[in-house]
Every structure is written in C-alpha cells, then in structure tokens.
Amino acid sequence: MQRLIILSLTIILVVSVVFGQNNTNTTAQSTNKNNTIKPGDNLVVQGIPAIPAELVETVKKYTESSPVFLSDWHPTKREMLVGKRAGNTFQVHLINSPDAAPKQLTSFPEPVGGGSYQRKSGDYFIFSKATGGNEVSQLFRYDISSGKVTRITMDDKKRNGSGPWSNSGEQIAYTAVMTGAQSSTDSFKTELHTINASNPQTDRLVINFDGVGWSPLGWSPDDKKLIIGQYVSANESYLWLLDVETGDKTLITPKIGNEKVSYGYAQFSKDGKGLYLTTDKDSEFQRLSYLDLTNKNLKTLTSQINWDVDGFELSHDGKMLAFATNENGIYKLHVVDTETFKEYQLPKLPVGQLFGYTWHKTTNELGFSISSYQSIADVYSLDVKTKKLTHWAKADLNGYETKGLREPELVNWKSFDDKIISGFLYRPPTNFTGKRPIIIDIHGGPEGQSIPLPLDREAYYVNELGIAIIQPNVRGSSGYGKTFLQLDNGYKREDTVKDIGALLDWIATQPYLDKDRIMVTGGSYGGYMTLAVATHYNDRIRASVDIVGISNFVTFLQNTETYRRDLRRVEYGDERDPKMLEFLTKISPLTNAGKISKPLFVVQGKNDPRVPYTEAEQIVAAARKNNTPVWYLMANDEGHGFRKKNNQDYLFYATVLFVKEHLLK
C-alpha cells in the first residue's frame, strides 16, 4: 500500500466537511418540544442559538453521502477490504466481487482504521482503534472464520502505528510511542517491535530509537532487514537499514553539506540489491529514484516530471511500478516496466486524488481509490496489461447530485512580495446573479494542500445559498516545490497571513465577488490562519469559523502531545529560545485577540492530542472580553476534528445558522 514517512506525523484533519450515510437511525437528531434540535449530552454548546428541526430536512441530501476507501486486497482471493461508514463511525467492510454490497465486519462505537490482511492465507486482518479521538491507537486482529477480535498491543499509554508485513507473511513491524504529560525537556524514545499477530506472545522489541519521527517502511526480500524512515521535518528526513535480528542500524542517506533533503516512501527492489524511493535531492520536487545499495549511486527515474511523485507501489513480482504525480492538485497515475522504465498506456481515469493503491498478489491488478469532483470516493482496480478498469465500489451519494456542478477553477494572485499564490474557486450555479459572498477555506498542515475535490457538505453553501468558496494554497503548502514549502518556517510565519491579505485585495477586484461579505474558516493550522486573519483583517471580513485551531504557539508547543512536540518546533520555532518565545507570543492570535470584533465560531474536541482544547477555551474567553459574538462547540468524545456523524451533523447545522446569520444578512 501507499505509505509515506510523513503519513503518521502530518495533521490528518476531519472537520465539518465530512461524510455520512443514511442506513441507520444514527443520522436522526432528537428534538425538543419546541421543535428544535437537542444537542447530544457529549456536546458543550455555548452561544449557539436553538437549531430549528426543519433545518435537518433542508440540508439532508448534503449530510447523508458516504465514501468508500480501499484498504487491502485478499492475498489469494479476488476480494478486498474497504473502509466505509456504518452508522456513526467508519468500520472495516468486505467486498467479495465488483459492485457487490459491502459486508460490515467490525462494529465499534469508535472509528476503526486500516484493515490489512495477513499476507499468506488471509485468515485474519489487522486494524487499529483509539478512544474518543485521543489517537492512542491499539492494534487488533480480526479472525475471518469466527469474527473474533483480539487485541494484540496492550499498553494503554502507548500509541501504536502498524507498519509493513514481512515477505513471509508471518510478522508485522510496528512502532510504539509513549503518550501523556511528559516534561518538554525529557528525552523521547520510539520503540520498534515485530510481532506474529496470530500469537501476541511473540511481540519483540527490536530497538529503541532516540526521538520521534521513526517508522518502518519495508522488509528486505529475505526479511532480515527493514527500511526505516526518520522524519525530521517536511524538508528533512533520512533512510536507514535496520538488522532485525541484532537491532543494528546503518544510515544510507547521509547528509552532505548544508542541503536539507527529504526522503519519502522507500521499498526494496525484488532482488534486494537496491531501493526504490522518492526524494527531492538536487530537485525542487519529490522524484522517483533508485538507490543501488552496493555503490550508493542514486539514479533519478522521473527527471522529466517537474511535480511531486506522491507515493508509489511495486508489484509483487517486481516487474511493475505504479506511482502518482501531483500536478497542481490533479493526480495522474503512471505504471512503468521496471526493466525498461517504459510507461504503460493506461485508460482514462476520473480526475481527482488517487490514493491507497496496492497490487493484488495473484491477479496483478492494481487497486486504488479515487476522490473526484463527480464522486466523493470510489474504489477501482486496473489490469495494466489489458487496460481493463473495474469499478468495485461507488460512494453512496444518497441524494447529493454531482451532475451539472461547476468544476473548481484554478485562480492566482500576487502577494506582498510578488510571489504568485494559487487556489481553487468554487462558483455557485449560474442562477445566482450579482456579486456573491465568499468563504475562504484554509487547509491545515501547514504542509497540506487544497486540491479540487468534491465539497460534500460545503456544497450546500455553494448550490443552495449562492456562496462562492475559495481554497487557497498559501506559502508553506506542499506540492509546489521544497523552496515554497519552507517559506513559512520560523520567523516567516506571518507571511502566510499576508498571502490571505493579498487574496482579500484580489477579491476586491473581481466583479463577481462581494468584498464586503467574506467569511474565513479552517481547521488545525488552518484554524490558526483563521484566527490570525480575524486579528489582522478584522475590518475586511464578516465572520470566522475556527476548527481545532492554534491560538497561542507557546501554549500549543508546551501542551501538544510529547511525541509531536519536537516535530512541530522544527516548523514553528522552539519556544525554549527566548528570542523565538518573544516572537511566537507576539504573533499569536491570543495576544491580539482584542482586535477581534466580528462574530467568531470556535469548534473543538475535548480529547485532541494535537491542538489541546485549552487553545480553544482561551481564545473564546479572550474574544468574549471584546463583547464579540462567540459561538463555542466542544465534543467531549472527539479529538482533532469530529469523526462521529452525530457530532458532525450538529456542527453542520450550527455552521449553517452561523453563515446565514453573520455572512448573508
């Protein structure tokens, strides 16, 4: 499967633009006698007016769609595991033939992640599960014949990340990191284990790595070595070879000079003599390369492509290599012959984001998911030799009509330093005339990227309310080269906010857009950006919606989970340095909260390990001192974003009210 070093470390945010389905009564909302929606007992609701029950039906077709994601092929049968919502949360399902109805396998009140078959017989699969959004993941085994679930990691204080299967199919490698309130000055360890999941007693600690950011990527053909990725920052990472028996490790991508180099995913070649990998060494972009382990020569394989190679996967027989390029937010699939590196001609695929691609061991089909503008997320397989494309599973749209929607438009504007910034503009249907109000929706990360995907719930604002939405890729976004990626680091932090200021200037020049009706929103780092815009450009916006956002960089760095803290310091700066402490304090939205006078909606999960709930509570308290209208919604059973449909629904209803009241009036 597609894996990247950064995968377990980046902020993967689930916010109000999330998916549901209508196959259970969990989508229903209880009502009060005055015919308004009653918030769940798990929700803390402050300042939010009563939500009329009729709103549920008004927006229903935008809340009931459900995507489906490929998790893994069965090792011998032509069937697959997929992730799909079952009631309130995502669970593992089985699809035993193309277009067959998914059969639910796991059933928990909490969301389930993954679903990876044992590599020989497929008698069981591994999945992960945390509690209440706390991200302290544990690994479990699901036995196919009986449906029995067995927990295979036992320490409730350790966050476990499942890694690759050995080629023998007997073992998996996984990491474990301690969670909890450790001192910011404590040294930190990342444990690497191997385990035969059929017998948890075989669990073996191979090595304790110093620090965080370590992850196993792949086994050597003889299962004696592991490729280990060491992630330092979005611009710096390394690859090591680890002897599984002795625990000895060897750096195979040493730092040369002052250049910071990023290495993404890596896999052994079939003969074990080299590694396929992605790297931005001597390039602005992540390129697919081959590293000869004998002479350490690095050969670039995609020098003709000036875009990032976003993951890859080697076929089981080692003869084909599939990879995707991210070209200005549009993903393109490539498959090459590993002997000649000649590309196979492929059928036309839906335009969108490709992910989760994995080869079937016996049929040599390539399976993958596509999230496209016309369908939220579908699952396909491709026979490369015959060019046959098979549609395995389609998202349940449940009334959400995608036909006729206007595709997002790539737009550009010049920032304060003449840097060209881009984003995607979603225009309302043509029946809406006159200047349109606009929502600026800023991605998280900050090393994220907005790409042209279906809006899902946000489509209600575009299609029904006539609001335009723009999703900017400010400096620091991924996908535009490593120089662009670093333009927001450390003392350059507020340059990203200036990019939004330049966007406000651009909006004012567009006859189609209403510069006097602008709302800004975003999640996680996008939440910080939202709050920063609310302080810098308070007089140029109508309202803002901050979702799990950073309000004070200093308290954020002091309180974020220990296993993340040093990784975030590389990006934002080290608050233990007096000069940086002064700077971070100065630019933090909390310091400047006195400037916020426009209505603010703050959303938070109580168990968020990334951006602790205290970040939300302190900005809410500070903004209220200005007599600013502040709505606050906190879910006691969520973490970094809302993942449970009942919580997502209430958030959406409240946000619709907020938009109507403070943007449109």
Image: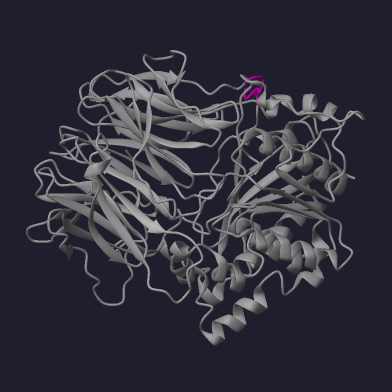
Q: Is residue 535 above or below residue 580?
A: above
Is-magenta flag for residue 605? no
Q: Say whether residue 393 is left or right of residue 587.
A: left
What is the magenta segment's predominant secondary structure?
A: loop
Q: Quadrant of the C terminus?
A: top right
Image position, residue 78 (x, y; %): 29, 18
Quarter of the figure with residue 528? bottom right
Left or right placement of residue 584 versus residue 539 in this view: left
Stretch in magenta: 398-404
Name the residue furthest right.
34
- The outermost residue toward the bottom is 578
> Is 616 in front, or is 58?
616
**The N terminus - image quarter:** top left
Q: For residue 399: magenta?
A: yes
- At which x and y percent is residue 24? 63, 20
Give coordinates of residue 464: x percent, y percent.
78, 31
What percent of the width, then of the height, locates residue 309? 35, 48
Residue 142 appears anywhere in the view: yes
**Residue at (59%, 67%) from the top-left corner?**
556
